[in-house]
Image (cartoon, rainbow, N blue to C red):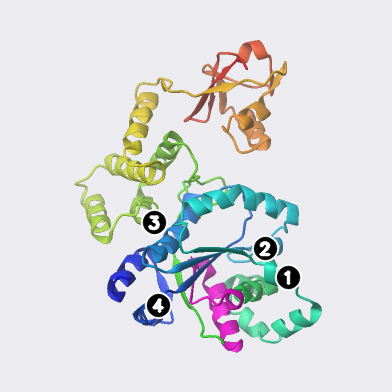
Amino acid sequence: MKPPREQFEHITRTVDVALPEGELMRQLEREAPLRVKLGVDPTAPDVTLGWAVVFDLLRRFQEMGHIAVLILGDFTARVGDPSEKSSTRKRLSPDEVDAYVDACLPTMVSLLMKERLEIRRNSEWLAPMGMADVLELTAKVTVARLMDREDFSSRWRANESISLIELMYPILQGTDSVAVKADVEIGGNDQLLNLLMGRDLQERAGQRPQSVATVPLLVGTDGTKKMSQSLGNYISVRADMNEMFGKTMSIPDELMPDWFRLAAGANADEIAEIVDSLESGTAHPGELKRDLARRVVDKYHGRGSGGEAEAAFDLLFREKQVPVDVPNVALPTDDPVWLPKALADADLVVSNGEARRLIKQGAVKIDGRRVDDESISRSELVGSTIQVGKRRFVRFIDS
């Protein structure tokens, strides 16, 4: 393993809080592999660049010889994480959660190293609990401790409802740390109090309490709120390179330093240069954003792909042409064709519902003409180029 100081500097490049102060460095100095826990609740079908920030941190631990323990919160996802929520979150069914696990897990694994990776589901230890187990667990935590959370306390002050199941969530997440004997737990900075609960429960279980480390939340393409699939302000790590480049180019200028750091992996010296050049006006924001978009695309599609995506972007937006490499997709045999399903099957949208919404918004075009109807004759679609939004294209061909 590399020297502790070198490990620390590599691992904590994006970390904003590490508690208790100095504990992570002391753990690294023990020169033994650490069990580093990341718990994720599968509540959406995709993995975003924002979600990938914490996966990057987990991978850096792996690169330094430590063990990544990925907890799939298939049980806690049914409860709903109240962090940063102003109202009770909709609960998911077991079938919904399993579908999200199936959709997301291959992408999550692709962001990590296959060696030194342990994947667990927290239903292993939470689902079998009986009432006696639950009472024993809740006896270890006071209501006052839970009300330290700003999201709970602000709702209480506003006379808004807080369900008992929401109060249970931090306790259940903390129980995960006991179950896997975590040395370190990581997460977004909205998870800090949940992570600290794990320390409390480990200590009461006779374990050495974990240290915790958090990363900032990546602000989405709207420039105001954290990246979220429910808000639609996200970029998928599975997006094709042209879409990824184009969406990155759409972010507000003021987000660039954080995006260079969190989404593109720039180091501290590079970020300082970027901030100086923006403040002094020595660099054009548009050129910096192109550099950012190239780096993001290179990260997820391989070296050189960012340049290819930039060329396609220029072809589309500077010369107002359709890209030359539009993929061909076999058209369904139905006549007429129900367009929402055809768009979903062609991976232009994530669901029929999204397709219907985009058609209503006028964001779907056939050979440059806006589509208003959901059902289109098959003869009209064969050989046509379909455009969804500004950057997604396919050409339908006869099956």
Residue occupying the far front of the picture: 115
Find disc 1 in the rendering and name its residue. Answer: 165
Residue 253 magenta: no
Amino acid type indicated by mark 4: Ala
Name the residue rendered at 36%, 67% in the picture: 64
Q: Where is residue 301? Give x, y as percent.
A: 40, 41
The quarter of the displayed image where residue 295 is located? top left
Q: CA distance from mark 1 to mark 3?
A: 33 Å
**Residue segment shown in magenta:** 177-206
Residue 185 magenta: yes
Q: Is residue 217 visible?
A: no
Q: Where is residue 278? Give x, y as percent.
A: 26, 50
User: Which circle's residue, 3 or 2, is located before the other in the chain?
Assistant: 2
- Disc number placed over residue 80 in the picture, else none: 2
Q: Where is residue 227? Give x, y as percent.
A: 51, 52
Nearer to me, 6 or 153: 6
| Number of other residues with Cα within 10 Å of mark 1, as a class: few under 14, some 14 to 19, many 20 or more | few
Helix, strand or loop at disc 4?
loop
Find disc 4 in the rendering and name its residue. Answer: 32
| Number of other residues with Cα within 10 Å of mark 2, as a class: few under 14, some 14 to 19, many 20 or more | many
The quarter of the displayed image where residue 265 is located? bottom left
Amino acid type indicated by mark 1: Ile
